Amino acid sequence: MDAKQLSQIVRGVMAEQSPPQLFDRKKMERVIDAAVAKADDLHVGVTICFMDLTMTVQMLYHMPNGNLVGSLLAPKKAWSAIAMKEPTKQINRETQPGGPLYQMETMLDGKLVSFPGGIPLMIDGKLVGAIGVSGGLVEEDQAICEVAVQEFLEEA
C-alpha cells in the first residue's frame, strides 16, 4: 500500500466520522492524561478545555493544583482559536498596538484571548474544534496545549 492509497483510506474514515466520535470521552481522557503529564513535568496546574466546531465545550478538566483564572481562560482560548481559525499565539501578534487587529479584544467584550495556549484542531485540512490550556506561564500553556493537540490528532 502506498502513501496515496493510505491517504484515501484515512480521508474515507474521517468523512464517515461525526463530531461526537471525534470528541469521544475516552479519547479526551487520554488526551487530558498526556496534557497532565506534561503539566506535571513543568510543575504547573492547568485547566484543559475541549471545544467542538459549534463552540460547545465537550470536556473541561481543572487540575487540583490549578489556579481559578485558568478555568475561565481555557475555554476562552479554545473559543478564540476556533473563532480566528488560528493558534492564539498568532492572534497575539496581530492585536498588538500597530497590528492589523489592534483593540479587537475590547471590541469582543473580552471573549477573545490573544496569548498562547489555544490551538485549533484541524483534521484533513478541516477545522473540527480547539483545545485551550490555561494556568501556567504562557510558554507552559502553549507547550501543554501542543502536547494535547498532538495526542488528539494521533487518536483521530
Image: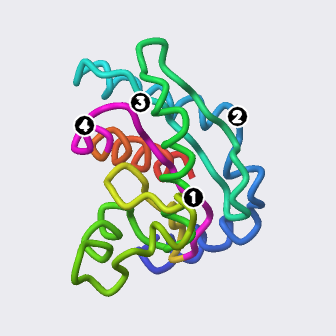
- Between marks 2 and 4 in the image, the one whose residue lies nearer the viewer: 4
Q: Residues within 10 Å of mark 1 (few under 14, many from 20)?
A: many
Q: Residues within 10 Å of mark 4 (few under 14, many from 20)?
A: few
Q: Which residues are magenta?
A: 126-141
Residue at figure coordinates x 56%, y 41% from the top left: 49
The residue wearing badge 3 is: 34
Image spot of residue 62 (x, y percent) = 53, 24
The residue wearing badge 1 is: 79
Q: Name the N-terminal-most of marks 1 and 2.
A: 2
As for residue 137 lying within the magenta part, the answer is yes
Relative to 137, is 4 above or below?
A: below
The residue lying toward the viewer, choosing from 131 and 75, is 75
- Residues marked 2 and 4 touching at CB (< 8 Å): no
The residue wearing badge 2 is: 25
Q: CA distance from mark 1 to mark 4?
A: 19 Å
Q: Looking at the rendering, which quadrant does residue 46 occupy?
A: top left
Q: Looking at the rendering, which quadrant does residue 101 occupy?
A: bottom left
Q: CA distance from mark 4 to mark 3?
A: 18 Å
The amino acid at mark 1 is Trp
Q: Name the N-terminal-most of marks 2 and 3.
A: 2
Task: Name the residue furthest top.
Answer: 64
Name the mark on residue 137.
Answer: 4
Q: CA distance from mark 2 to mark 3?
A: 14 Å
The amino acid at mark 3 is Ala
